[in-house]
Image (cartoon, coloured by chain):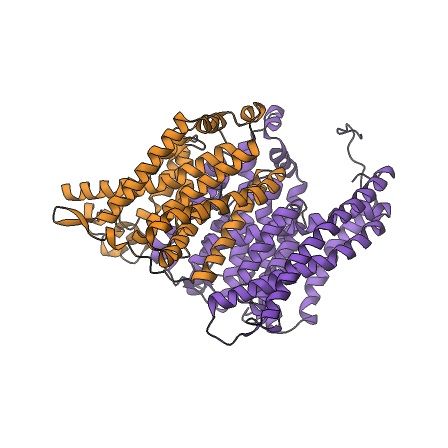
Chain colours: A purple, B orange
Amino acid sequence: MTDTTSSVAPPYPTAAEKLKFYGLWVGAAVVLLLLPKLFSSGGSLTTFSLIGISIIFSLSYNILLGQTGMLSFGHAVYYGLGGFLVIHAINIIGANKLPIPLPLVPLIGGLTGLLFAVLLGWVSTQRSGTAFAMISLGVAELVASSALILRTFFGGEAGISANRTKVFRLFDWSFGPQIQIYYLVAAWTLIAVIAMYALTRTPLGRMCNAVRDNPERVQFVGYDPHVVRYLAFCFSGFFAGIAGALAAINFEIANSAYLGAVQSGTVLFATYIGGVGFFIGPIVGAIFVTILSLGLSDLTQVWQLYFGLIFIAVVLFAPGGITGLLMMHRPLLKAGTFGRVLPSYLIAFVPTLAMLIGLILATEIIVYYAVHSGDASHIKAFGVPFDAANRYVWAMAAILLVGGYWVARKTWTFVGHAWDDATSVAREKGIAA
Amino acid sequence: MLELIVMSTLNGVLYGMLLFLMASGLTVIFSMLGVLNFAHASFYMLGAFFGFQISRWFGFWPALLIAPLLAGALGAAVERFGLRRVHKNGHVAELLFTFGLAFAIEEVVQIIWGKSPVDFRVPSVLDFPAFTIFSTNYPAYKMFMLLVSIVIFAALLITLKKTRIGLIVQAALTHPHMVGHLGHNVGRIFMLVFGVGTALAAVAGVIAGPALVTQANMAGLLGPILFVVVVVGGLGSLPGAFAASLLIGLVQTFAVSMNGSLSGAFGPLSPDYAATWLADIWNVTIAQIAPIMPYLLLVLILIFRPMGLLGTRDT
């Protein structure tokens, strides 16, 4: 056992560590700058912008879920309100010719998110855990339904729109073309990510983790968990507002879907699938989920079902998310025992893949019979054409599904043994697993 | 005025009893397993769609029996093979699992039955006016719904108060760990309770299906209200859930039938403000804000009585 407490401050970072740390951020900035040079089509620029917005939104959500341990089902409220206020702000700035350039407008969204988090947060954060989850859901429903009643402000079902090119221009940037919007989103993403990372390093960020892990002890130390949760909630609302503002600028419209349950669910999916345990998790999740939702919808009609199943699979089998899975291997890599697990992965990969293909095939056949049983039976899913009425295809799906499951179970126990073996060797070498 | 009060009371009690059919299962599941089943309303929806499909094949009465059994079996399977696995990852993982499940069930229902409402009709035996009050016909089917919910309520009450299994469930409401220490097969009780709870929700679905709209978004519409009921009543309190169900049922039904607005009470707003958001608030009727009433109630309860009406436990 190692000591769990330490009375000395951690060592001051060496020059190499500092270089690595700042190099990482500079590298991220360079990548953001060069991305449009590599993928210059309009579609990919839009995708990058959406990913950037999603990254800010997911990271802001993780301030609640990952850092402070609060599961919110209504985070889209602050995102949506930020978006609506920004659309109104753009209209007002345009009409009155105020000297506020577009790059500063997302700040208005952020402040809106902050304001509403300050107003609604005090009641919401009184309790944590399940009660907080239910309260966030209730507040979200309240705001979403009110948005449909206050028609002049929220524009009812249709929403409200604005023209972003009518805003005061700095250096003659019109922000009409998508490339300029991309750079706007990229700059704000970088700023927000750095700010949120810095937040996790502050005493407040540390207290948030403490409140997540043991609120009772936090009270003994002399802090009020409610206040800590409230502050985390306010910061989270601020960054969610920025994300909503960028989304509103990107689409030039805000409607009630921004505030709705679907939006709240999507950010929860992205954050959790990416992994709540690490700072980088929500970033990975945002990229993964955005690309998945854009890509899957071209490949299959029932992409949302697959999306839900992926989420359930992550909750069941990989509660740490994608980053959690990857980070599990770090001690093994350090100890040099990763080679022991790798062969078992390769063996388990084949039947697992067979099982998944069988599952997809069976799902697509069922979907064919449920939705378009009258149409031609030659269907195409994931780019692969097959005949849904063919008995051999049915048999193949069944064999792949059942056989794959049966073999996969055996191989995964094998993986488990190899894993235990590799970690115990790593532990002997003194690398904590 | 009297007509309005009588009709709204009848409808409100009916709606409240339906809510309680679902909230009771949700509360007992929450108290025993510590997990708020996000997919509970999805089982209500599954009940309605199973009922619709079975009533097409065999008629309404077999459907009333088979659909809840099917949904209950599905619920038990979810507990046995899903929830029990994620239990070791904590309550957040459990809640997220049921959240994902609710999402997936909605998608599956949309794939099989489509997005538009299905034609789930009141059985012809019950398709007549039961009685006429104030020149309004009150449909017999609604009386049937009320009867079924009251019978189930009574059965639930007797089971909980007079039988051995009820004794264990009651004990588990307040002292879940002690029940386990006393040597009961907690795993099997959990599975049973989850199955019965989801079956109750499915009963509500089958009987509400023909009267309300049977559609793939019905779980999404009702789910949040169900959670409001459970939180307002007090998490884990069965009498609280009953009181809150009736309260929300009555509040919503009365609100829907009222047409008053601020402009009705204080006269129309000065035309200077006609185009501002103030006009929206001034002209909105109570009927229009009926859908947000439960959530307003939730926020008020949380401010003034965070434990809920009859709740005792903190989280």
Image quadrant of residue B300?
A: top left
Question: Left of A60 or right of it: where is B142?
Answer: left
Tell me what residue is drawn at x 53 percent, y 62 percent. A102
The one nearer the camera, B240 or B282, is B240
Residue B107 appears at what percent x and percent y?
49, 58
Judge whether A363 appears above or below A372 on screen: above
> Which quarter of the figure is the C terminus of chain A placed in?
top right
Residue B295 appears at what percent x and percent y?
38, 43
> Which quarter of the figure is the N terminus of chain A placed in?
top right
Judge whether B240 appears above or below A108 on screen: above
Can residue A185 be seen here? The reply is: no
Label tally: 0
Residue A34 appears at what percent x and percent y?
70, 67
The one nearer the camera, B290 or B249, is B249
Judge whether A310 appears above or below B78 on screen: below
Tell me what residue is drawn at x 67 percent, y 47 percent. A279
Question: Left of B253 or right of it: where is A221?
Answer: right
Tell me what residue is drawn at x 45 percent, y 32 percent. B236
Image quadrant of residue B154?
A: top left
The one nearer the camera, A227 or B217, is B217
Can residue B27 be seen here? The reply is: yes
Residue B117 appears at what percent x and percent y?
36, 60
Tell me what residue is drawn at x 75 percent, y 28 percent. A5
Question: Left of A414 or right of it: where is B282?
Answer: left
Question: Left of B238 or right of it: where is A432?
Answer: right
